[in-house]
Image (cartoon, rainbow, N blue to C red):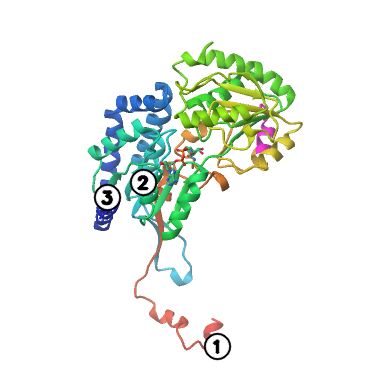
Amino acid sequence: MDAHVQVLERLRATFRSGVTKPEQFRRTQLNKLKSMIKENEEPILNALHKDLAKPKFEAVLSEVDMLNNELIHAISNLKQWMQPDYVGTNLATKLDDCFVRREPLGVVLIIGPWNYPIQLLMVPLVAAIAAGNCVIIKPSEISAATDNLIAELLPKYLSQDCYAVIQGGAEETKELLKNRFDHIFYTGSQKVAHKILQAASVHLTPVTLELGGKCPCILFGNVNATAAARRLVWAKFFNSGQSCVAPDYVLCSKATRDALVPAILDVIKEFYGEDPQTSPDLARIVSSGHWTRLMELLGKSKGKIIVGGESNQEDKYIAPTVLVDVAEDDAMMQEEIFGPILPILTVESLQEGIDLMNSKEKPLALYAFSDESSVVNTVLEKTNSGGFCSNDGIIHMTLPTLPFGGVGGSGWGSYHGRWGFETFSHQRACMLRGWTLERLNGLRYPPYTENKLSW
Ligand code: NAD
């Protein structure tokens, strides 16, 4: 039997035994995951540094703390999430117990990307454990140090009969996907998502897709240029722009651009110093391949570089780079940038900006910066995206009470907090009836006489 099948059979047998269903079992495993993170924070931060030169502060904030918050939230809400929801009844079902019961799906597969290799694998895992599933996780081979650390740590803390790590790249994942799962939760690129869907279709497996895209940031009306620049630069260059919710491009009027650009230049200097390559607060591009892709994209762009553009392949470094005079048909506007390059496009009116955003795939996040609430509300009303945040970037995804996920091309389904619990649960419609009032039931049995119809 091949190794994947063996793991799957083991997990399937465990799931059938019902061991993962009791609240106490789920709670214990979540607490063990919490201990794993607490007791191994240093090796985790070191691995993230090895993979992406992730600054400690960014790693703590976006990986360790995010995961801890989800764990705390899940542990404290688990009992309530597991309660059945009683629903309204009608005359014919008045005496019945009618409720929705959340049941685990079975053995689920979670496939993660490399940009937040802890958070984006472990937060779905929290939801899957909370919902009572057995889980196989497949970390990204590109963030190799974190991938290896997860494979080493997880079996030491969590039940090996219920949870397993399978490592490997595209080929191993394709093999793994030949098997039947009860759900596939995939985070990564749109390109690979097509392959995941094709594989899932063979077994009619339901899929959650957490994808990317071009997240716009539109600035209009009165805007505090200094505050906007600080928040924009932080959100864009956090993890060197390798965030699925990073502002991908900026839209604003010429006047706003002229006020914003000097503020952005000041803020980049303030955050990363005169020479950002020497800053400990700027992550590196994850791989040589991604570095080359970004440099080629920069080479193809006809935009004017107003800051940055410097790079070093050996160090996988690209300076925080801002481009102006970028046209809508520029190379920068044809694909998700996913790196430290920010194009600024000018538009004549708010409506033109809205039309431009709406001409593209629905993004994972959409940002509107303005002092005027009417501008923010107009953008919110006239656009569509997975998530929305005014006057800041990224920060909306840190709340476990908000669903996180895309719409259209940026993804299907959502998670975080209760939303993740629901994703990994089946909402089973239950009606518990007794044997009373059988005479009343006679009204629906044949022979279907006329007087039964008029009753
Ligand atoms: P990717 O799609 O290349 O890889 C993701 C996972 O898929 C990895 O585990 C990889 O091993 C596996 N994989 C790669 N090729 C495969 C194949 N042919 N068949 C089966 N599996 C395969 O994505 P990535 O480069 O790791 O991540 C970047 C993308 O992910 C960006 O588009 C980004 O926006 C998106 N992303 C989305 C979110 C979100 O939450 N929505 C979060 C992070 C990243």
Q: Which residue is mark 2?
A: 172
What residue do we see at 39% from left, 42% from top? 124
Percent position of residue 342, x then y: 60, 26
- In the visual, does 200 lie left or right of 453? left
Given residues 78 and 16, the one toward you in this image is: 16
Q: Which residue is mark 3?
A: 3
Specify the amino acid type for callout 2: Glu
Secondary element under disc 1, as helix, strand or loop, is helix
* Position of 86 relative to 244 (above/below): below
| Disc ID at residue 450 | 1
Specify the amino acid type for callout 1: Glu
| Range of residues picked out in magenta | 370-379
Mark 3 nearby-residue class (10 Å; few <14, some 14–19, many ≥20):
few
What residue do we see at 43% from left, 68% from top? 94
Res 29 visible:
yes
The furthest residue to the right: 348
Does the beta carbon of the residue at mark 2 sit less than 8 Å from ligand 1? yes
| Disc ID at residue 1 | none
Percent position of residue 187, x then y: 45, 42
- In the visual, does 10 lie left or right of 252? left
Specify the amino acid type for callout 3: Ala
**N-terminal label among 1 and 3:** 3
**N-terminal label among 2 and 3:** 3
Spatial CA span between label 1 and label 3: 64 Å
Mark 2 nearby-residue class (10 Å; few <14, some 14–19, many ≥20):
few
Magenta stretch, main secondary structure, is helix
Spatial CA span between label 1 and label 2: 64 Å
Given residues 324 and 257, the one toward you in this image is: 324
Percent position of residue 70, x then y: 39, 37
Res 391 visible:
no
